């Protein structure tokens, strides 16, 4: 059974930043990378992606520059700023801690003893 997961609030920003850690991408490239890396579990729609990109640009976490896409169309390419890289490192640590805590709870086989 295939399942597509809804993005938890706040997740999209860190996924976008991670997508750009390997180099510049345009919006479609970011969306496609997230879809591929998550085995198609996460699909980012344009109506969600572009407002997030603009928000991250206003926060100085990424920069944008016009260029030509693979099929010679004008496209806006996004890159991480130094502040964006720092933010990605910090957010990654938080998400890893969060995921570990949720994993512990979901894998629990018994209720802990009262202390």
Image (spheres, rainbow, N blue to C red):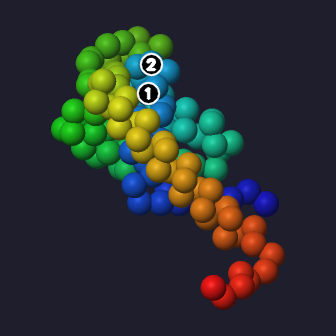
Tag 2 residue: 23
Tell me what residue is drawn at x 79 percent, y 80 percent.
Answer: 110
Q: Nearer the viewer, residue 17 or 7?
A: 17
Height in image: 37 above or below 23? Answer: below
Crowding near pointer 1: few (<14 within 10 Å), some, many (20+)? many
Q: How many marks?
A: 2
The reply to whether residue 16 is in sight is no
User: Residue 7 appears at what percent x and percent y?
Assistant: 49, 57
For marks 2 and 1, give the CA distance.
5 Å
Tag 1 residue: 20
Q: Nearer the viewer, residue 37 or 27?
A: 37
Q: What kind of element bears circle 2?
A: loop
User: Residue 74 appears at what percent x and percent y?
Assistant: 32, 18
Whether residues under marks 2 and 1 lie with C-beta atoms below 8 angstroms apart, the answer is: yes
Tell me what residue is drawn at x 51 percent, y 50 percent.
Answer: 95
Quadrant location, the C terminus: bottom right
Tell me what residue is drawn at x 42 percent, y 23 percent.
Answer: 25
């Amino acid at each position: 059974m295939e399942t597509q997961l809804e993005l938890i609030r706040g997740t999209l920003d860190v996924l976008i930043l991670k997508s750009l850690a390997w180099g510049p991408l345009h919006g479609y490239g970011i969306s496609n990378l997230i879809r591929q890396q998550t085995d198609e579990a996460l699909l980012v729609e344009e109506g969600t992606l572009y407002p997030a990109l603009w928000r991250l640009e206003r926060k100085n976490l990424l920069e944008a520059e016009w260029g030509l896409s693979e099929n010679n169309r004008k496209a806006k390419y996004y890159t991480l700023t130094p502040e964006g890289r720092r933010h990605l490192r910090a957010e990654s640590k938080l998400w890893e801690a969060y995921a570990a805590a949720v994993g512990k709870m979901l894998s629990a086989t018994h209720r802990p003893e009262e202390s």
